[in-house]
Amino acid sequence: MKLVFILMFSFFCNSQSINQDNLKSLHDFKAEMINGEQLDLSTLKGKKVLIVNTASYCGLTYQYQDLESLYQDYKEFGFEIIAFPSNNFGKQEPGSNEEIATFCDSKYSTSFILMSKIDVNGKNIHPIYEWLTKKELNGVKNSKVSWNFQKYLIDENGKLVNYFFPYTSPKSKKITNWIKKK
């Protein structure tokens, strides 16, 4: 009986495991920046990264200010922020890439990496967000982007560490302590 239990347990555990061949890191991706240039994310090897989906007309848009402050405080320590504008929630990012760039520069003087507008969920989900939200691709956990300004933490090796819901401040202790941790 013990042997049957062990075999069944072993089978169950193996069937629930993640196919390591499907796993990727952030460094495996390329994406278009807001100016139309391609960004090879392998250039971020060795840096901690916060990825956030943004919108210019959201009640949380004020977080751009905290994101910029966070970036200024920690960029010297090998930290990057990548913002992906998205119109997926309440159509709160209707502008063109040029309009979004102008808004971010004039209103918040952003200097972190701003990407082209993408879909962060749905049938046209960008491959980076597919990776961020599917455990079988990231090896860590499933998630669903619930609204604008959801934050994903990526370690120096390009691996997903955790995510935080939109109302979590970019400057929360959970995030700043992670950035400072060696």
Image (spheres, rainbow, N blue to C red):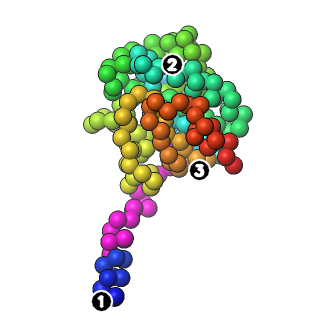
Left or right of residue 76: residue 114: left
SS at mark 3 in the image:
loop
Q: Which amino acid does label 2 sit on?
A: Tyr
- Stretch of the chain drawn in magenta: 11-30
Q: What residue type is labelled 1?
A: Met
Judging by the rendered image, the residue that carries numbered circle 3 is: 157
User: Is 158 drawn above or below residue 165 in the view shown?
Assistant: below
Q: Position of residue 157 (x, y in %)?
A: 59, 50
Q: Position of residue 127 (x, y in %)?
A: 39, 41
Residue 62: image tag: 2
Name which of mark 1 and mark 2 comes first in the sequence. 1
User: Is 6 drawn above or below residue 68 in the view shown?
Assistant: below
Residue 1: image tag: 1
User: Is 90 drawn above or below residue 154 in the view shown?
Assistant: above
Query: In this view of the protein, can residue 1 be seen by the observer?
Result: yes
Q: Quadrant of the image for the N terminus?
A: bottom left
Residue 24 colored in magenta in the image: yes
Left or right of residue 61: residue 75: right
Principal SS element in the magenta part? helix
Between the residue at mark 1 and the residue at mark 2, the CA separation in whole angstroms equals 61 Å
Query: In this view of the protein, can residue 97 be seen by the observer?
Result: no
Relative depth, front residue between 76 and 123: 76
Q: Residues within 10 Å of mark 1 (few under 14, many from 20)?
A: few
Q: Where is residue 173 in the image (x, y as percent from the top left)?
A: 60, 37
SS at mark 1 in the image:
loop
**Which quadrant of the structure image shows residue 174?**
top right
